[in-house]
Image (spheres, grey):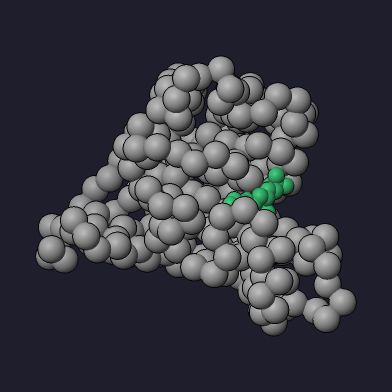
Amino acid sequence: MGSGLDRVAICRRRCRFARVSSLPTASDSESPPLSLGVLVSGNGSNLQAILDATGRGELNARVQLVLSNKPEVRALARARAAGVPARCISHKDYPSREAFDAALVEALREARVEWVVLAGFMRLLTPVFLDAFPWRIVNIHPALLPAFPGVHAQRQALEYGVKLTGCTVHLVDTGTDTGPILGQRAVAVRAEDDEASLSARISKEEHRLLVDVLAAIARGSLTVEPGGAAARPRVALELP
Ligand code: GAR
């Protein structure tokens, strides 16, 4: 493995071989916007950061569809306020995780989504979903992975007593918050921090990091080198 032909670039439309250069080119800047689907479960501040960045022209992307597994969450209202199609597909309406994932995939495909962003989406995805968007699912997590995966990452960091935590954007694989890391930003923990104050500072960094990562993907600068059956793929992405 690891030969030139194994090197796969995850570009904006489909995988192709050996795209190593990440410098923006004329064709990159003229490319159509990245077609995004955003999965949410709650507040939607990361979704808002994406919508705001596209509106300001800082992110060459279009949010085609927002899906929530919970009804009436603020994220759905944010999407509708921005004129983006948004709907709830409740996991409670499906007999299995796989059936729920298949419904998500169908909706995203109908909306012609190329890349999926998990922006506070609090459900584990099965191979039914992962195989539909291979290495095209991005997750934001409020810790410096591999530290503090799963839920309540900020609480975990405070309980452990770390002095530095932060946020991570990574590609999604079959594990919980284990996929290849695309970018991280550090946040210092203060002596007086509680979960709310720490979460608020991490949240600000999340918004910048997520937009930076998506903008870099939109420029076609992400490469993913498959690692073989057992190994992790290696990724390269130039961030500002
Ligand atoms: C964010 O902090 C995100 O990192 C976290 O949920 C929050 C959603 O905020 N995701 C996870 O913990 C996933 N393991 P938002 O709804 O305001 O974007």
Residue 188 or residue 146, whichever sits in front: 146
The image shows residue 122, relative to residue 69, as above or below, that is below
Residue 5 percent across, percent down from the top left: 13, 57
At horizontal 48% and vertical 49% (from top left) the residue drawn is 138
Residue 171 or residue 95, whichever sits in front: 95
At horizontal 29% and vertical 54% (from top left) the residue drawn is 9
At horizontal 56% and vertical 25% (from top left) the residue drawn is 91
Residue 156 visible in the snapshot: yes
The image shows residue 173, relative to residue 206, as above or below, that is above
Rendered image quadrant of residue 240: bottom right
- Left or right of 8, for residue 208: right
The image shows residue 141, relative to residue 129, as above or below, that is below
Position of the N terminus, as image quadrant, is: bottom left
The image shows residue 55, relative to residue 141, as above or below, that is above
Rendered image quadrant of residue 164: bottom right
Q: Residue furthest right?
A: 192
At horizontal 55% and vertical 39% (from top left) the residue drawn is 123
Residue 218 visible in the snapshot: no
Count how many numbered circles sit on residues in the image.
0
Residue 35 percent across, percent down from the top left: 49, 35
Residue 126 percent across, percent down from the top left: 40, 37
Rendered image quadrant of residue 78: top right
Residue 155 percent across, percent down from the top left: 71, 63
